Structures are given as structure tokens and as C-alpha cells.
Amino acid sequence: MSWLKSDASGDLLKWGMDTLTHLRKLGLFSARVPRYTSYPTAPVFSTATGASFQTKCMERLDPSEPVSVYVHIPFCERLCWFCACRTQGTTSLAPVERYVDASIAELDLWRDALPEDLRMGRLHWGGGTPTIMTPAMIHKLGAALRAALPAAAPFEFSVEIDPTAVDAAKIAALTAEGMTRASIGIQDFAPEVQGAIGREQSFEATQRCVDMLRDAGITSLNTDLVYGLPHQTEERLAETIEQVLALNADRIALFGYAHVPTMAKRQTLVDETALPDDEARFHLANFAALRLRKVGFEQIGIDHFARPDDSLSVAKRAKKLKRNFQGYTDDTCPTLLGLGASSISRFRQGYVQNASATAAYLKRIDAGQLAGHRGHFHTAEDRLRGRAIEMLMCEFHIDLDILEEEFGAMVSILGPIHDAVLRKFPGLVSLREPVLAIAPQGRPLVRMIAHCYDAYTPYGVNYSKAS
Ligand code: SF4
């Protein structure tokens, strides 16, 4: 690849090699740690914190602060082998219709607990495949959401779109309901890779979908790519990246494939012998990052890239970037309400996750109960550690002055952790008061460094590889 060899920021390759060497020395090459989209992470949640905690948190919301809402649609027309999302395959629309009705009933239960006049600043429909819904279902759900939580100004509504399960009528329905941003899953366009992950999606079908979105007036477009897939090579990934660039997306997420068949049974269909080894995987990630930076994307945290004028890049430069369950966000709403099976709500006081299995979720809603069944009450120390982890994941440093302003003398409990991090990652992390910073060549290790601040999670087989 000539552009790779001639790139002026070729230091990334050297940093990549330094980091690789360091990981090997530490015996952490294949370490598995969380992605830290929350702290603590969902496996830590307990059934001792459920619907009654959810009710109290909802009742105490300040109506002057808009909330974000996430809606989970756990159905797909196809089940891709690599995917670990909470979803189920269906060839019939009957269970989807039933689920949409249950989600609307859940909104009615919310209305009993939420303060009047609460507004919605952000809305995201994810899954699963939200575009499995018919236009009539989209309108029904959209109207119920608007009735429960009118839109604040400004309002952003993003939807995950499967190009193989959408048409102009569904896009028109979503646009009429206020969709402002579309997110398209791609992963890799190479037929060899798609065949090995049980997901066919041609570039032409994706292009048609993007054209329909543009025709409908959608200007904000996200795409998702995945590295570390079976039969993926630099050449194939390079070709996919060129095709994605032709789609002219504003944001590209580049996630590492997390092969955890013990957790995601579908992944047992993935041929493990065709997966790139740890070193190849590491190079794939660097290779893609370098190309995206070369064509003008800003790197956002560990796995997002955005055009310089995109709101995510603006938030990064303003040091206002946050982590949420979708990854990086510029969303400033302090509260996230999760609607639907397995959705997680984030309150100032802690997290609550709805019943995960669709059947269990429907049973609770039919019984007239809020669906929260497990969660976590935040202690002051959780909030402090979570804030430090979020700073690392978003900005690759911890500003101790900001932590002290927010948490006072309690910040001192992090002192021994800083010392341990400096010992464990020599030359890659520095502490020059008031900032503990990860050097550029240490950034691929950020999840492992963040893990040192996690009081709950051991290294585990159920998380993705950190490199
Ligand atoms: S990748 Fe998308 S379409 Fe495939 S199983 Fe996962 S959620 Fe469903």
C-alpha cells in the first residue's frame, strides 16, 4: 500500500510496534478487559437493585434537564454469526408487533413515575434491527414516545439501519418521526469475510440505502466497521475502507471483533482457525486508523473516527466527549432511559437494566411492572473511579484538578493506583501534576490502564481482547 508507506504520520507504525513489544513483555497481549461504556460494567449489576430503585430514580429526575432515550428492538431477519447483540431471528412480524405494543405499555408505566414536563434531548433506536418494523409500527412507536416525552430543542434522533432490511417507505416513516442521523452496519465488504461471518451485504445494496437516506434529507451518517474478522487481510480491509469512504460518512466506528462464543452462542459458527492472530489483528487496527487519519478523519478515543466538522470531533476538541453504551458521544444529557428488553438506564444514582430475555420482559410489562430487574447503586467511590476511567477512555489522561473539584479529598484514594499504573506501564504513562497522561504510543493500552481503576472486574475471558 503506497499511501501507508509514504504517510507522514508513519510514527503510528513505530508506536504500534513499541506497544506490541510492551504488551508481550507484560504478558498482556491477549488480555481481555471491558470496553468501559459504563462503570461498573453490566456483568457487575445485581438483582438487588431493580424496579423499585428505577421508580425512585425516575421520580427524582429534574424536569428542567432533558433526558436521552434508547429503544432496543431485539429482532433480526437474519442472525449474523459474529454478532453478540441481544437479538433473535424472526421471519414473522407478529412478535415484532407484540413487542412494539409492549414497549408502548412500558412507556405508559414510565409516565406514572416520571415528572411532568420532562423532555427528550436525544433518541436512539438500536438492536437488533429497528428497520424490521413496518412503517405503521415506526409511526406507532414514534407517536407514543413523543406523547410520553416531547422533544426538547435541540433534538437528535439516530437509528441503526440494516441496508438489507429497509426500503424507501420505512426511511420516509423514520424521517417523518424526526430521524436526523442514520447508522449503517457494514463490518467488511469482502465476500470471503462476509461468508465467514454469515452476513451478506453488497456494496451496491449499501450504496442504494445511503442514496435513499440522502434523498430523504438525512445528512448525518455513521458506519460501523469491524477488524479482527475471519479471513480479513490488510488488502481486503483496505478495499472496504475505500468503499466506505465513497459512501461519504461523517463518522466511522472501527470495532475490534470480540470472539466470546461462551457468551454469544452464534459465534460457535465462526471458524476460529480463520481468525487473524493477535499480531495481525493489532496491525489491522493500526492500518485502518492510519488510512482514516490520512484522509482527514479525526480519531476519537479508541475506535471512532469523525470528520473535523462533525459534532463528535467538536466535542473532543472542547473536552466534552463522553462514553455511553453506543461508544463515544457528545450527548450531554445526564440521564439515559432504556426502553425495551435488556436496555440499560443510567441515572445519577446508578444503573438499571431491563429484563434481558424478550419473554421475561413481556411478562413483566404484561403484569404492569417496570421492567428493571438488575442494576447498580453508585457509591461516591464508584462515581470517582468511573469519572477517572471515562477521562482515560475519552482523553487518554486524568486531570486530577478536575477530579478534586468534583470529588474533593476523596481523590487521594486513587494515589496508590496512579503509582501502580506508572510502575506497570513505564515510559507509556507519566504523572506531571495535575495530569496523569498516556503517551501516544501507549494509547492502544488505554483499556488495560483504565482497568487498573476498576474495583470490580478481574481480567476475564468474557471480554474482548484489549489490543
Ligand atoms: S449484525 Fe445486525 S442484523 Fe446481524 S445479527 Fe447483529 S443486530 Fe442482527
Image (cartoon, helix red, strand yellow):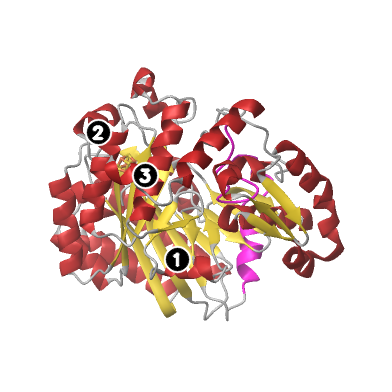
Structural crowding at the residue carrying mark 1, measured as other residues with C-alpha within 10 Å and reported as few (<14), some (14–19) or many (≥20)? many
Q: Quadrant of residue 422?
A: top right
Mark 3 or mark 1, which is nearer the start of the sequence? 3
Q: Nearer the viewer, residue 216 or 416?
A: 416
Q: Which residues are magenta?
A: 32-61
Helix, strand or loop at label 3? It is helix
- Residue 10, x across and y down, in percent: 43, 46
Q: Residue 393 vs residue 270: left or right? A: right
Q: Which mark is residue 194?
A: 2
Q: Is residue 389 above or below residue 319?
A: above
Residue at the disc numbered 3: 288
Q: Closer to the N terminus: mark 2 or mark 3?
A: 2
Task: Specify the amino acid type for callout 2.
Answer: Gln
- Kindly check if marks 2 and 3 are in contact, taking CB atoms under 8 A apart as contact: no
Mark 2: secondary structure: helix
Three-letter amino acid code at disc 1?
Ser
Q: Quadrant of ligand 1?
A: top left
Asked whether 157 or 5 is in front, the reply is: 5
Question: Who comes first in sequence, dot 1 or dot 2?
Answer: 2
Q: Visible in this render: residue 316?
A: yes
Q: Position of residue 151 (x, y in %)?
A: 42, 77
The residue identified by callout 1 is 313
> Which amino acid lies under the numbered mark 3 shown in the image of this protein?
Ala
Quadrant in which residue 395 is drawn: bottom right
Q: Secondary structure at mark 1?
A: helix
Residue at the (19%, 58%) spot, across then down:
210
Asked if marks 1 and 3 touch (Cβ < 8 Å), the reply is no
Which residue is pictured at 69% across the width and 39% down the height? 425
